């Protein structure tokens, strides 16, 4: 029964991911390759019950999500350059944060804590609107592609039209004097895409953090191209860009 379930799952996924239904057009090629391989293989049995079709992977270039690929690289480089000894992340992609923990001790805070045993990495449960951390205690803080979802109910959170702004206020309050906040979210034409996410203009994002100073801005444009250290207005006319902001908190005098 488990083998049948595995087979069914493999074939269902072949027609759902990464592009629904498209895989059906590649079935003739799959079975032609299957017959050719079976004719050549003499040491290992090729059983249909063990098949695992990957129908749309034969492409000229490796596909990737530009937002998540570039924001992870941007964060790792920025944190490394800053020489931080400890880093706190709020709800970002666990793939990026796992890599980050390879060179800086990292605490990952998420509504759904990650159960993973990894050196340099710790996970704790927390709601971004009520974080279990002391205010003004974090010197290096990140939150990538998260605050645009808050208050839309997508992840079971309460409906709140001010969700993004409240999350921004909570992040700002955590930052220690002299600390840095690394933030990313969709930027461009301001709108609510209920209940997936919000898109804010770059200026609106800066206005969410009146107690912080914008230190740098990078972005991934609508064409998926990365632009390092540009003016925030560069992304103002985009439809769905990824804005990457570095904010700093002034030192106390």
Image (tube, rainbow, N blue to C red):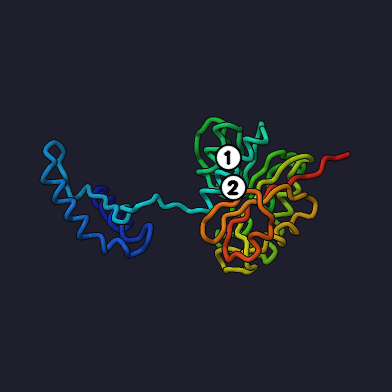
Give the class, few, some or many, for how many residues have Cα within 10 Å of label 2's Cα (few <14, many ≥20): some
Image: 152 above or below 214 = below
Residue ranking furthest to the right: 253
The mark total stands at 2
Q: Residue at x 58, y 63 (%)?
A: 197
Where does residue 253 sit, x and y in percent of width and height?
Answer: 89, 39
Tell me the tag on residue 123: 1
Where does residue 95 sit, x and y in percent of width and height?
Answer: 50, 43
Which residue position is annotated with label 2?
110
Where does residue 231 sit, x and y in percent of width and height?
Answer: 69, 55
Tell me the tag on residue 101: none
Image: 202 above or below 64 = below
Q: Secondary structure at mark 2?
A: strand
Where does residue 152 sit, x and y in percent of width and height?
Answer: 60, 64
- Along the line of sight, which residue is nearer the eye, 121 or 180? 180
Image: 107 above or below 19 = above
Image: 12 above or below 172 = below
Q: Is residue 48 left or right of residue 94?
A: left
* Mark 1 to mark 2 CA distance (whole Å): 8 Å
State if disc 2 and disc 1 touch (CB < 8 Å): yes
């Amino acid at each position: 029964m488990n083998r049948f379930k595995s087979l069914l799952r493999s074939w269902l996924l072949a027609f759902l991911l990464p592009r629904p239904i498209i895989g059906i057009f590649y079935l003739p090629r799959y079975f032609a390759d299957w017959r050719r391989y079976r004719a050549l293989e003499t040491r290992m049995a090729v059983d249909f019950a063990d098949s695992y079709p990957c129908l749309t992977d034969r492409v000229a270039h490796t596909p990737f999500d530009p937002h998540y690929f570039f924001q992870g690289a941007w964060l790792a480089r920025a944190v490394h350059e800053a020489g931080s000894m400890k880093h706190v992340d709020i709800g970002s992609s666990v793939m990026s944060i796992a890599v980050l923990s390879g060179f800086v001790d990292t605490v990952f805070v998420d509504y759904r804590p990650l159960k993973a045993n990894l050196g340099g990495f710790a996970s704790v449960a927390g709601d971004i609107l009520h974080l279990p951390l002391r205010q003004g205690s974090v010197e290096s803080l990140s939150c990538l592609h998260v605050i645009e979802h808050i208050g839309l109910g997508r992840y079971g959170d309460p409906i709140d039209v001010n969700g993004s702004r409240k999350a921004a206020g909570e992040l700002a309050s955590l930052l220690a004097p002299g600390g840095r906040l690394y933030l990313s979210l969709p930027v461009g034409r301001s709108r609510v895409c209920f209940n997936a996410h919000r898109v804010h203009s770059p200026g609106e994002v800066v206005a969410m953090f009146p107690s912080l100073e914008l230190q740098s801005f990078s972005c991934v444009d609508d064409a998926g191209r990365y632009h390092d250290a540009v003016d925030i207005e560069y992304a103002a006319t985009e439809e769905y860009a990824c804005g990457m902001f570095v904010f700093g908190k002034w030192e106390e005098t």
